[in-house]
Amino acid sequence: MTRLDLLLVKQNHAKSRTEAASLIKEGRVKVNGVLCQKPSQSFEDDCIIEVEHPESRYVSRGGYKLEKAIETFGINVNNQICLDIGASTGGFTDCLLQKGAGKVYAVDCGHSQLDERLKGNPKVINTEETNARFLKKTDFGDEISLIVMDVSFISQTLIYPACKDILPEGGEMVTLIKPQFELDRSKVSKKGIVKDEKGVYLKQIKEKITAASGRNGFILVDITDSPISGGDGNREYLAYFIRRNINEGNNLPQPEQA
C-alpha cells in the first residue's frame, strides 16, 4: 500500500508530492473510479488513477494568485531582481518570469520540488533546503528589489526580519496570507479550517502583520483577496508592502478592507 500523493508521482501524474497534494485536494483525482481528496490515503500500487489536469499558464496555480497581486497593486516586475520565499513547485517564480523579471532566487526549505522547466531557466537560481528565517543580504549576488512569499506551517511575520535585511529602502514585497498559520490554534479547526464569516479574524491578522511589518521597516500598503482558495479550502489574501526607512513616518495609505 502506498500514499496517494506518492502514487501520483510514481505513475507520472504529478512532478512532485506538492503538486500531487494540490491536485488531490482540488478534487481532480479519482482512484478506481472514486473521487479521493486525502493525499495520505493509501492504495495498492496497481490501482487505476485518473487525473483531471487543469489548463494552466503557470507550473502551479500559485501563479494566478501572484498575478492578481501584481495587477491589483500595479507592480512593475520588468527587469526586477526577485526573491521567491517558499517557492515550492514555482508558481510565483513562473509568474515573475512571465512578467519580465530579470532574475529570480527561488528559496524553499524542501528539496526537489521546483518544476524542471524552471530549474533549467538561466534566470532562476534554485536555492533548496534553506530556512528563510536565516537569509541575509550577503547570501545573494545581486540586490533584491522585489520579494514574494508563500509559506506554510509558520507565521510569515517570523520571516520579516530577514526580509528587512535583504530588501533596500523602496523595495517591494508581496505575501500570501494563510489565516490558519497566522491565528492562535484555538481559532482553527482540527482540520485546519478557519471560519470567519464576519471578518473578525481577518481584522486580527491585519493588525498582526501591520505591527510586525512596521517593526521591521515595512509599510503595509494594501490587502486583496486571493482569486483562488487554498488547497484546504481556506480563504486566502495577498498583502503588499513597501520597505521604508525605519525612522520615517507611515505616510502611505492604510489598507482597505479586503
Image (spheres, rainbow, N blue to C red):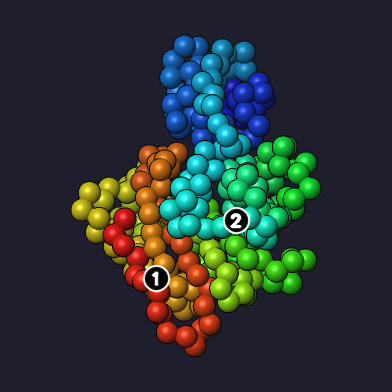
Looking at the figure, which quarter contains the C terminus? bottom left
The residue at which mark 2 appears reads as 77
Residue 250, compared with residue 48, is above or below; it is below
Tell me the tag on residue 110: none
The residue at which mark 1 appears reads as 210
State yes or no: discs 1 and 2 in contact (Cβ < 8 Å): no
Q: Residue at x 41, y 67 (%)?
A: 221
Closer-to-camera residue (252/124): 252
Q: Residue at x 67, y 43 (%)?
A: 114
Q: Is residue 212 visible?
A: no
Give x and y (percent) for residue 119. 74, 43
Mark 1 is on which residue type? Thr
Q: Residue at x 69, y 72 (%)?
A: 137
Give x and y (percent) for residue 212. 44, 73
Real-space CA distance between mark 1 and mark 2, rounded to the nearest whole angstrom:
24 Å
Mark 2 is on which residue type? Val
Q: Residue at x 70, y 69 (%)?
A: 143
Q: Is residue 91 visible?
A: yes
Closer-to-camera residue (22/220): 220
SS category of the residue bearing label 2:
loop
Q: Earlier in the sequence, mark 1 or mark 2?
A: 2
